[in-house]
Image (cartoon, rainbow, N blue to C red):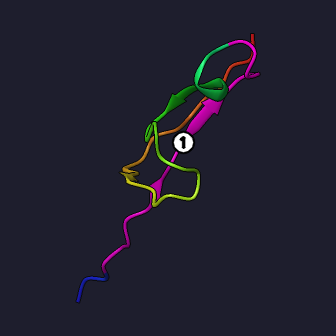
Amino acid sequence: MRKEIPTVRTQLKLWVRAALVAHGGVIYGNQMGQTDDSDAATALGGGSIVVHKE
């Protein structure tokens, strides 16, 4: 019997100081327009995230 692995979902939002850009400082969101407490919709399939500071 094969054990089923549950799907992991995430919501990612990157922002900077609100004075620098419109939309409350959000520069990227995989669910733009959704609230921070909305259900995550993006299934993870592996990989990594790297954030570089200028």
- Please indicate whether residue 54 sits to the left or right of residue 24 in the image: right
Q: Nearer the viewer, residue 53 or 22?
A: 22
Q: Is residue 20 above or below residue 36?
A: above
Furthest residue in direction bottom, as rendered: 1
Where in the figure is residue 47, as x and y percent of width and height? 45, 40
Quarter assignment of residue 25:
top right
Q: Nearer the viewer, residue 52 or 30?
A: 30
Q: Nearer the viewer, residue 50 or 1?
A: 50
Badge 1, how many Cα within 10 Å: few under 14, some, many 20+?
few
Magenta stretch contains residue 18: yes
Quarter assignment of residue 6:
bottom left
Q: Amino acid at mark 1?
A: Leu
Residue shown at the point (68%, 19%) measured from the top left: 52
The N terminus - image quarter? bottom left
What is the count of numbered marks? 1
Magenta stretch contains residue 17: yes
- Please indicate whether residue 36 sits to the left or right of residue 40 in the image: right
Residue shown at the point (54%, 50%) measured from the top left: 35
Q: Secondary structure at mark 1?
A: loop
- Please indicate whether residue 3 sits to the left or right of residue 38 in the image: left
Residue shown at the point (75%, 9%) measured from the top left: 54
Q: Is residue 3 above or below residue 33?
A: below
Where in the figure is residue 37, as x and y percent of width and height? 57, 58
Q: Which residues are magenta?
A: 4-20
Residue of label 1: 12
Q: Main secondary structure of the magenta part?
A: loop
Where in the figure is residue 34, as x and y percent of width and height? 47, 46
Where in the figure is residue 23, as x and y percent of width and height? 58, 25
